[in-house]
Amino acid sequence: MLTCFLIFFVISQLLAQDDKATTALQNKHWALQFHIGSNFSLSSFQGSLISLKRQFSEHSAFRFGVSFGSNISNLDGESRIFPVDTIQSKNKTNSNGLTVGIVTQYIRYSPIDENIVAYYGAGPNLSIMHSKYDTESLNNDQTTRTNSWGAGLNGVFGVEWFVKKNLSLSAEYAGSIDYNFSHQKNTSKYIGGPTYINESNSHGFNFGSNYVNFGLSVYFK
């Protein structure tokens, strides 16, 4: 269904294009961006939810990607001994998590040919993650909570080729530096006994670089 929608969207933009200009790098134009994978499959470019670009002029633009993920799971189980039908063990597990991330860049363009431009850019990125894991058994209850966040700077440079005015292919390199912090709290409560709480923090810097990222951009206004 998504592939059919993308094909329809691309065709409609191509049919609606204005041939007076060779590229859509113009003020107030938007671009929806996709990553081109193996076998020409399309996936997220720099955000699992959406990746967009907003043109300010033929020389500059603002690009951003948003990622979002969540999960909820529940599991109940028990073990019995027969023929007395005695419960030997019983476990109930609940887990949930939420992840949000955003990557941004301010982009500058430098023309190479009539429909080919080189570009470079940089900007901040931010990510937040929360997770909770609960386990209940015959003897004790355990809860693990984790809160993490990361912030940093990223940079890109690449080349964009306009196959049509509103459709382009690109190839780029990207790199980033991030600071990450995580806080974890483990609580163990024993039935008829004490409660133990253990908390820990971890933090550090991460330097990363990506291989060549091939992209498809569909421009509209």
Image (tube, helix red, strand yellow):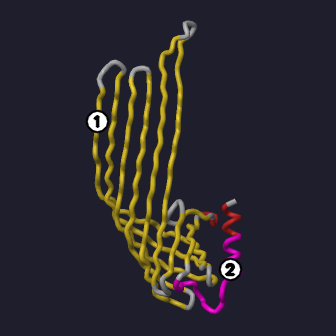
Q: Quadrant of the C terminus?
A: bottom right
x, y percent for residue 59: 46, 86
Q: What secondary structure is found at the residue carrying circle 1?
A: strand
For numbered disc 2, what is the local secondary structure? helix
In the picture, the disc for residue 198 is 1
Q: Which image quarter: residue 216?
A: bottom right
Q: Amino acid at mark 1?
A: Asn
- x%, y% of residue 66? 48, 63
Residue beneath the point at 43% across and 37% down? 133
Quadrant of image for the N terminus:
bottom right
Q: Residue at x 66, y 61 (%)?
A: 2
Q: Looking at the image, is 157 positioned above or below residue 200?
A: below
From this view, report whether residue 167 is shown above or below residue 175.
Answer: below
* In-image side of 35 versus 12 (left or right): left
Q: Which residue is mark 2?
A: 14
197 or 7, which lies in front?
Answer: 197
Position of 53 with respect to 166 (left or right) is left
Residue drawn 44% across and 24% down?
137
* Residue span colored magenta: 8-27
- The amino acid type of the residue labelled 2 equals Leu
Dominant SS type (magenta) = loop
Q: Decide which of tag 1 and tag 2 comes sooner along the chain.
A: 2
